[in-house]
Amino acid sequence: MELRFTKEQQELQHAIRQFAAAEIASAVPMMESEERFPVDLIRRMAERQWMGIPIPKLWGGAGKDFISYIIAINEVSKVSAAVGVILSVHSSVCTLPILNYGSDQQRQQFVRKLASGEWIGAFALTEPHAGSDAAAIRTSAARKGEDYELNGSKLFITNAGAAGVYLLFAVTDAAKRAGGISAFIVPGDTEGLHIGKPERKMGLHGSNTCELHFEQLRIPAEYRLGREGEGFAIAKGSLDGGRIGIAAQALGIAEAAMLLLRKRLQLPKGKLLTHRHAELAELMARTEAARLLVYRAASLRQDGRPCTKEASMAKMFASDTAVAVTGAAVRLLGAEGLSRDHPAERLFRDAKVTQIYEGTNEIHRIVISGRLMK
């Protein structure tokens, strides 16, 4: 079976590829040197409706399918993985959950502005003592009349500081553990929300990653997403899409590194195959296998079919491939590959985190094996 995109998907892919080569590429030096969120670049993407690709036109989006959205992340990440993760978190784990689980009032109030790119979205689940074990979060939400009061903190939140909306998870009934977690929509200008200083990361420069602190933060009860106690299910239901997005990001990184290697290791006419070219063939096969896993998971997600195992397989394999290919690029390019002026060095730094966020690959191996044992 050959993976084929529709004409509309191909047109979107071509448009984003051209935009990335011209406008995203020109913003990369600024993001790398200043580690500054690319506000103007995201605005130009929003003008093209790319911040709401999988959102129905009814709610202000572009009305395209999930595969089109994954194509966008893939193409953007070939040029900038930082912009790729900004788009992925904004769409997969903030805008889409509010669309899927929210009331019409919440869709009207929040999804429209997120889909248009007027607001950027963020997903606030991870805490200092609750990374892979999301059920162990301690941020609390207590009902106070017509409001909820939130207290606690979050860690490593992508898009923090730039976000107009945070999808936040807090404990409403500690006795129920995962069953006592609820989801809340928190506007970025809410009193009591404090943004920590941006993390100085190994890679993904230009993508904000900050701590969040909540001190007697009050939001109306109608900002709760779903019923009390449904937060953990909402988070899990959203993470499949998020993991496919990160898999597409990792795939883009791997494809960009493969292009560098192919240009550098071209085989002159009449020359024999070397061990380096044999390694290149192996890496190309891995990259193509990752591509098929990514788009298979995206296809299942688009059709509304179960895809937890497939999303984990795609994310695990694509991220491991990205690290392998970028590592090989740095090594095979020699001293040139270590230079901050060479894209291989940036791709190598950007690749590593794809093995860690949206669930570490160790967690994904547990998820996959658990599904196989059922």
Image (tube, rainbow, N blue to C red):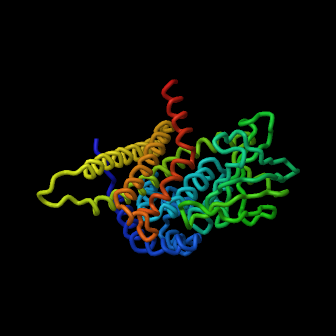
The picture places residue 83, in percent across and down from the top left corner, at: 51, 64
The picture places residue 233, in percent across and down from the top left corner, at: 65, 39
Q: Residue furthest right?
A: 145
Identify the residue at image location x=68%, y=57%.
Answer: 166
Left or right: 27, with 174 as reference point: left
The quarter in which the N terminus is drawn is top left
The picture places residue 294, in percent across and down from the top left corner, at: 42, 46
Q: In this view, does 173 lie above or below 201?
A: above
Residue 35, by quadrant, is: bottom right
Q: Which residue lies furthest to the left in this view?
A: 270
Identify the residue at image location x=72%, y=35%.
Answer: 179
Residue 181, by quadrant, is: top right
The picture places residue 279, in percent across and down from the top left corner, at: 30, 48
* Viewer-proximal residue among 46 and 195: 195
* Viewer-proximal residue among 237 and 158: 158
Q: Is residue 93 above or below residue 367?
A: below
Q: Residue furthest top?
A: 374
Q: In this view, does 197 lie above or below 370?
A: below
